[in-house]
């Protein structure tokens, strides 16, 4: 007899009907010995989007999986119709500006004496716009990688789909109610169908939700717990019939993966208003909801909620804001504690792609199965890999350096064409020269971009920028062959005529000073990422142009001029890509990877300003220096 039903609800973007529940069923089927075969989509599909089918795997009668049915809540067709119409959703950058504006308004309301100024939020607007621009550019690079067979990951569509679906759920009540009605209706159909098969039994329902599907399912659960009447917003009848919400009595477990619930709670607080969630645990272990002294709803037990998120996931986070929300509203319906039931880890190699990698992770699903669905008492939480954590952190920085290396290589090969063998030292240890000059260019980028991406207080970030520059400049002073240093630094040696510098160091010193001047330009313009990038590239172009023109004029370069010009354009393009990728990587690690931005927003809802964190730069409340972040 079937007594458990797994209900999957998908996340953002384009989805295949029944694709999500097949992925879930596959993870369950892997627990059998031997593993059950992967079933085709048609095995789960019913054809009608609004209807629900409960499917069972071909498990032996004595297999615990024989007791489990699988169903799906499909809602991707709703945002797809809106996107296809192309007359409702706001352009991504424009919508991003509204999010920052709402964050600023929330800050002003909750922290009236806060230290952040209007220009700090303008910096936030600039960062959001830069992230969007960078992702669009990275889409082309990832397409090249896919064609080469290295790996395939559609980063830009992922984030565009996320922004579109979030807009629809948060800012358009009609579509939100339509999606929520789909969720309630599906659960009601599942329970009704089960009771037709087994009139004397009640099913145990376990909801598995991913991405924005976690927000929809959480809202749906809270509406059912609150006793809110849910009707079809498209129903034109004078009297709309609400969905039967008795399905909430059957929910026993709740699994969220890659969940952005916290961001929705702190950025869209009105979504969560008007819910009657006050409840208490009764003597029998159940949860009672009372209204006017009468029990209107009683759950047999709290819903066992487990959350899983990878640190490389740009969308999923720890859900301490959800825990705080439930506590503030007196809701006892969930067995959920961030210390015991909220699992963060580093298991997936590629940042961003991690958002979809949960479906291929047997340990994540295995823990939920053994801890909640089929308890064994031996459930082992997904382990975090220190090696994966470090490598996944380094990958985008390595790619950034690779772009800087490619920029230097292209330009270097074009301009170092010498007229005779007397200049042979220029080519001495060529790989070393390119590596050192690439490191110097990378240090320029880092030192110049830091003030564009952070709120600077004191000299902390100035020292960080100086250290970054020295990491590229010092190796050049020590190890760059004299021929290469003189070749690039000679146009600026006149600036050192007043100083007593050893001849062997004149070229190197002039080159490093020119590099420092380029890096310094990033600190002398308004704190807007795009303006800073334009000034940086413009100033760098001027310095490179002086070097190239000087070399062409004195006959050091014998190559035709047009290849040098093409190489210069390629250099600028690759450097520009490197700057964009560094910005995205830095913002990712500082604000997103460790949930610092969400934690800061959460502090604002507590009417507390956030003070700088020793590593991340923000996050700890001023009144609680030891508050964990």
Image: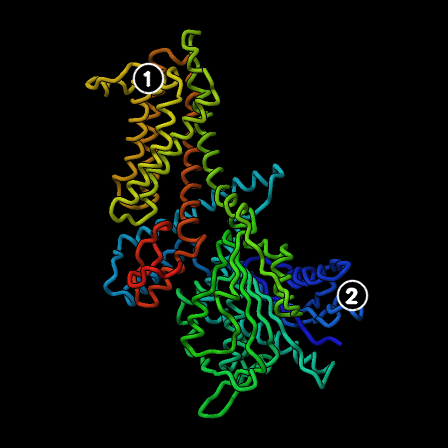
Q: Is residue 483 visible?
A: yes
What residue is rendered at 52% in x and 86% in y? 282
What is the x, y in percent for residue 384? Answer: 55, 53
| Quarter in which the N terminus is drawn | bottom right
Q: In terms of image quadrants, where is residue 148?
A: top right
Which residue occupies the foreground of this view, 124 or 598?
598
Horizontal side, residue 557 vs residue 143: left or right: left
Q: In terms of image quadrants, where is residue 491?
A: top left
Which residue occupies the foreground of this view, 398 or 42?
398
What is the x, y in percent for residue 367? Answer: 62, 63
Report how far apart the C-alphas of labels 1 and 2 lie in the structure.
Answer: 77 Å
What residue is rendered at 51% in x and 64% in y? 342
What is the x, y in percent for residue 396? Answer: 48, 42
Residue placed under numbered mark 2 in the picture = 58
Which residue occupies the foreground of this view, 451 or 534?
451
Q: Is residue 88 visible?
A: no
Q: Can you tell which mark lies on residue 550?
A: 1
What is the x, y in percent for residue 29? Answer: 72, 62
* Colour scheme shown: rainbow
């Amino acid at each position: 007899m079937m007594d458990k039903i797994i209900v999957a609800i998908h996340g953002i973007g384009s989805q295949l009907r029944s694709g999500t529940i097949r992925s879930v069923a596959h993870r369950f089927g892997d627990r059998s010995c031997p593993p059950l075969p992967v079933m085709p989509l048609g095995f789960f599909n019913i054809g009608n989007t609004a209807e629900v089918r409960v499917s069972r795997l071909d498990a032996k009668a004595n297999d615990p999986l024989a007791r489990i049915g699988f169903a799906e809540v499909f809602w991707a067709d709703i945002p797809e119709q809106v996107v296809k119409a192309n007359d409702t959703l706001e352009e991504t950058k424009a919508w991003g500006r509204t999010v920052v504006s709402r964050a600023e308004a929330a800050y002003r309301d909750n922290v009236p004496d806060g230290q952040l100024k209007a220009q700090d939020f303008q910096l936030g607007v600039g960062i959001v716009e830069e992230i969007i621009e960078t992702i669009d550019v990275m889409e082309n690079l990832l397409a090249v990688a896919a064609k080469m067979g290295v790996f395939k990951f559609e980063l830009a569509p992922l984030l565009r789909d996320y922004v579109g679906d979030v807009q629809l759920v948060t800012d358009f009540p009609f579509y939100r109610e339509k999606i929520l009605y789909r969720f309630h209706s599906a659960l009601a159909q599942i329970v009704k169908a089960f009771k037709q098969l087994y009139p004397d039994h009640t099913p145990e329902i376990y909801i598995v939700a991913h991405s924005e599907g976690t927000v929809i399912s959480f809202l749906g659960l809270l509406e059912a717990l609150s006793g809110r009447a849910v009707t079809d917003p498209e129903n034109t009848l004078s009297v709309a019939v609400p969905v039967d919400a008795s399905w909430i009595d059957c929910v026993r477990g709740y699994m969220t993966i890659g969940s952005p619930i916290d961001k929705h709670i702190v950025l869209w607080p009105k979504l969560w208003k008007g819910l009657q969630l006050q409840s208490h645990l009764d003597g029998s272990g159940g949860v009672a909801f009372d209204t006017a002294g009468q029990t209107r709803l009683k759950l047999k037990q709290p819903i066992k909620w487990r959350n899983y998120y990878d640190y490389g996931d740009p969308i999923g986070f720890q859900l301490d804001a959800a825990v705080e929300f439930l506590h503030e509203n007196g809701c006892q319906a969930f067995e959920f504690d961030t210390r015991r039931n909220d699992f963060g880890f580093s298991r997936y190699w590629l940042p961003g792609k991690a958002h979809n990698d949960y479906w291929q992770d047997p340990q994540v699903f295995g823990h939920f199965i053994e801890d909640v669905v089929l308890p064994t008492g031996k459930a082992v939480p997904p382990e975090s890999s220190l090696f994966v954590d470090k490598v996944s952190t380094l990958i985008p920085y390595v790619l950034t350096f690779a772009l800087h290396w490619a920029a230097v290589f292209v330009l270097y090969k074009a301009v170092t064409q010498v007229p005779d063998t007397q200049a042979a030292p220029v080519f001495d240890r060529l790989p070393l020269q390119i590596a050192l000059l690439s490191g110097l260019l990378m240090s320029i980028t880092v030192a110049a971009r830091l003030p564009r991406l952070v709120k600077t207080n004191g000299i902390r970030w100035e020292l960080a920028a100086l250290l970054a520059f020295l990491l590229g400049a010092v190796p050049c002073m020590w190890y760059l062959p004299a021929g290469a240093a003189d070749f690039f630094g000679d146009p600026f040696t006149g600036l050192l005529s007043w100083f007593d510098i050893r001849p062997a160091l004149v070229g190197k010193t002039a080159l490093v000073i020119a590099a420092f001047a380029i890096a310094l330009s990033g600190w002398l313009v308004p704190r807007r990422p795009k303006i800073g990038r334009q000034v940086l590239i413009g100033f760098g172009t001027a310095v490179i142009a002086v070097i190239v023109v000087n070399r062409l004029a004195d006959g050091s370069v014998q190559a035709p001029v047009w290849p040098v010009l093409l190489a210069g354009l390629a250099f600028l393009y690759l450097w520009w890509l490197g700057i964009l990728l560094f910005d995205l990587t830095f913002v990712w690690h500082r604000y997103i990877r460790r949930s610092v931005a969400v934690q800061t927003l959460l502090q604002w809802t507590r009417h507390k300003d956030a003070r700088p964190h020793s590593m991340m730069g923000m996050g700890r409340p001023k009144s609680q220096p030891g508050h964990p972040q």
